[in-house]
Amino acid sequence: MRRGPDSVLNDALQHACDMFAENATLAFIWVSPDMTVVSTFGELASFVPPGVALTDSVPVLFGYEDDLAALQDHPEQTLEIPNISIVTGREQKPRLNLSARWSAPRQQYLILVARALSRAALEQELQTQVRGRRMAEMMLLEQAQDIRETNRALAEVNRDLAEFAHVVSHDLKAPMRALRYFADDLESSLSDPDAGDPRDHLARLKGQSRRMTTMLSSLLSYARLERKEEAVDQVDTGTLVAEVIASLPVPANAQVSVEGDWPTLMTIGAQLDLVVRNLIENALKYCDRAAGRVTVSGAGDAETLTITVADNGPGISLEYQDAVFRPFAQLPDESGAPPLDENSSGMGLALVKRAVETAGGTIEITSDPANRPGTVFTVVWPSEKEAESQG
Amino acid sequence: MIIRKIMLLGEMGVGKTSIANRLVFDTFSGEYGVSIGSDIYQYQVEPPPGDNPFLFNVWDTDGSFGETIFKSVYIRGAHAAIIVGDVTRKHTMETMARLAVRFEEQLPGRYLCCVVNKIDLLPEGEAPSLPERLVSRGLPYVTTSARTGENVRETFATAAETIVRRGQ
C-alpha cells in the first residue's frame, strides 16, 4: 500500500524525536533576532516562557549576545557552550551543553539545551581513563621486562650457538681427521706389510668411532638441557647424593664421604643428579693419591642448597679454571700433552655448568695447585621457587 | 537590573569554588572537589552600587584550563575577572599574576582584581609574599579567606561599584 505524505512526515518526526531523546535534549528554544524567546519545547521548556528576554531566563547566555548575532552571518556555525552547571544550592544540578544556531529560513535562533555527562559520570570517566593509563603503563613495563628477558634468552642462545659452532668446527673435526688417518693407515697396511697390522689400525679406528659417538651423545645431552616445569618435584637431596655415590665405581685408592645438611627442596631431580654425579666422577677420575679423598658437603634450607665437592687431587690451575667448563675440554697432563682418553667426552663439567645455570644457580672453582693440592667445586642450587622469584 | 559576567580564574585548589560558595550561600566546606567545565552562580550585590540592583553571573572555571581559558568559549563576553591565588602555595601566586597579565592583554579595560586567598592560614602578622610581576605591574589585589569570609563580599562589592562607576 502506498503511504501518504502525513505518514512519512510522522515517521520523520518520530525519528527526530528518538534522536533527540537519545542525545538527552532537554529543551529547544526558538529566539527572535532581538533575543526574545518565541517558542519552546522539552523538559526544561517551562523555565523559559515565551515573550521574555533570553538572557533573563537563560543567564548562561548573558554576555554571548555578540556571538549570537555573529551567527546570522554564519548560519553554518554553531555556538557551543559545553559542560556548564547553574548552581542554585547545595544539590547537584544536571550539567548542560548549550548549542545555538541561526535558522535562516525561520529567521530565528534555535537554542538546544542537552544533558552533559553528570559530574559523577565525568569523574568515573576520568578515573577509568586514569586506570586505563596506569594499566597501559604497567603493560608497557611488563612488555619491557619481557623484551629484556627475551633479549637475555637470545643472548644465551647466541652464546650457545657460538659455542656449538666452535665445538662442531674444532672439537669434532679432530676425531674426524683421526678417523680418516686411521682409515688411510688401514688401507696402506692391506697392501704393504710394513705399514703395520691391519687389525691394530682397525682397532684404533673403532676406538675413535666410539669416542666420536660418546662426544656426539654428550653434545646432544648438553643441547637438550633445559628447565622443564613438569619435571619439578620434591627431592630429598640427601637420598639423591647417597644413591649417586652408591652407583659410582670408587677406585680402591679413593674414599667418598658425605657431610652437612641435605634438605628436601622443589627442583628437577635429574639435573641435580647430573651435577652431583659429574662432580664426584670428575673428582674420582683425577684422584692421583694413594689415599684419595672426596668430600661432598651440603648446607641450606628448602630455598637454596649449597653443595661443595672437595678433593685432594692435583688441582686446576687458574688459567684452566674457565676452560674446564667448555664442551670437550680436557686438561693437558703434567707434560703439557693433551689427554688421550677415548672413554672421556670432556663434557662432564660443561654439562654441570649448563645444568646449574639452567636451574638458576652458580658454580665456582677454588683451587691453587701451586700452593696446595685439591679442588673445591661450590654449587649454589636454588629451589624452583627461589629460581622463579629471582626471575 | 544591571547584570554582569565575572570570571573566577586561578589554579586548581586555590579556593575559587569556596569563594563562590561563601559569596552566594555564605557557606564553607573544607572538602576539596575539582571543578569540571564551568559552574555558574548568580549573586546580587548588597548594597546595590549607586542604588542600582546589580547581579553578577559568576563563572567558576575549571582550574586546569590554565592560560587556555582565554581561548575557550567560557570567557567570551566577560566583564570582569577575579583571579585567585593560594597564599600558602607560591606557584599558584605566580600563576595568578600571569593570568592577570593575560587578562589585561586579552580583555583590556575590563575590571580585574587579584585575590590572595587562604590568608587565614598565614601566621598572624605575617604579610603575604607577593609575586614580583604583580607588584611591578601594579596589579590590584586584596587578601581574602573563603573559610572565614574575610573580604569576600567586599571584593565583589568593589568590583560592582567600579564597573558601575566606569559605566562598563
Image: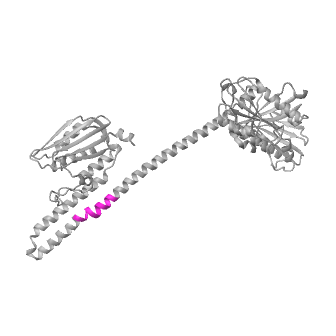
Residue drawn at (18%, 63%), measured in percent from left and top?
A208
In the foreground, A13 or A301? A301
Q: Is residue A170 magenta?
A: yes
Quadrant containing the N terminus of chain B is top right
User: Is residue A306 in view?
Assistant: yes
Image coordinates of residue A260 in percent, x first then y, are 22, 35
In the foreground, A53 or B161? B161
In the foreground, A66 or B63? B63
In the picture shown, does residue A383 fall above or below B17?
A: below
**Residue stretch in magenta:** A162-174
In the picture shown, does residue A378 fall above or below A44?
A: below
Residue drawn at (73%, 23%), measured in percent from left and top?
B27
Corner quadrant of residue B60? top right
Q: Is residue A28 left or right of residue A253?
A: right
Corner quadrant of residue A200? bottom left
Image coordinates of residue B21 in percent, x first then y, are 74, 27
Image coordinates of residue B109 in percent, x first then y, are 83, 41
Q: Is residue B91 left or right of residue B82?
A: left
Quadrant containing the C terminus of chain B is top right
In the picture shown, does residue A90 fall above or below A146?
A: above
